Amino acid sequence: MIDRRALLFAALISGAAHAGKLTDAQAKKAATDWIAAMQLKGDEPIKLDAAVALTATTMYAVAYDDDGAKCAETTATAPAAITKTLTCLRQHVAPSGKPKIWTRKSALHLSGPLLRHAKQIAALAKSATVVELDDGCDGMESWVVLAVTKDAKNVARVSAVLAQHMTCGE
């Protein structure tokens, strides 16, 4: 059976990609820049202008912790919706580890709620360069998957964020 949601998601996100995929180095740099602009897990309110500038005009996002979805699954297309999504992600995403390029083998290690998004991540990888940050299990595991695309001006933009911060066993 074809997952209609995955097909719709791929169509939405692929519309944000232009002129081919980014190189691995470009995608890692864009992901690192976006993470820095977000000032993730900060308690003080900040303006998200720098992060918005590094975000695609269509953005898919979801974030989980042990209690479930903290940032509900959404595809934001309006500027206000993107800012609202980024605000939630800033509060609930805690990337750790060095950025690596997503591979098919990466999917074999998915666990927790992100496992349900394996098809969506595979669809993203067809039109975007997917970067993952996973620090492994040390009692808590933080796993962040970012899709990075080029906009119409060939500027790298984060078009999807899937994250989980979960208790794990060693």
Image: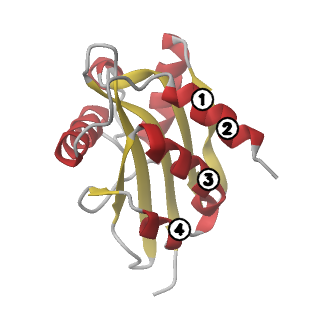
Mark with earlier residue (4, 2): 2
Mark with earlier residue (1, 3): 1
Q: CA distance from mark 1 to mark 4?
A: 23 Å
Q: Which mark is residue 11?
A: 1
10 Å crowding of disc 1: few (<14), some (14-19), many (20+) = some
Q: Nearer the viewer, residue 51 or 14?
A: 14
Q: Nearer the viewer, residue 90 or 43?
A: 90
* Circle 1/circle 3 CB separation < 8 Å: no
Name the side, left or right, on which 6 lies relative to 130. right
Q: Is residue 42 above or below residue 77?
A: below
- Residue drawn 52% across the image and 29% down it: 13
Q: CA distance from mark 3 to mark 4?
A: 11 Å
Residue under label 3: 119
Residue under label 2: 7
Q: Secondary structure at mark 3?
A: helix
* Circle 3/circle 4 CB separation < 8 Å: no
Q: Is residue 18 above or below residue 152?
A: below
Name the side, left or right, on which 110 lies relative to 73. left
Name the side, left or right, on which 53 lies relative to 63. left
Residue 78 percent coordinates (x, y): 54, 12
Q: CA distance from mark 2 to mark 1?
A: 6 Å
10 Å crowding of disc 2: few (<14), some (14-19), many (20+) = few
Q: CA distance from mark 4 to mark 2?
A: 20 Å
Q: Quadrant of residue 52?
A: top left
Give the number of the mark in front: 4 or 2: 2
Residue 165 percent coordinates (x, y): 49, 60
Mark with earlier residue (1, 4): 1
Amino acid of disc 3: Lys
Amino acid of disc 1: Ala
- Residue drawn 31% across the image and 60% down it: 96
Q: Secondary structure at mark 4?
A: loop
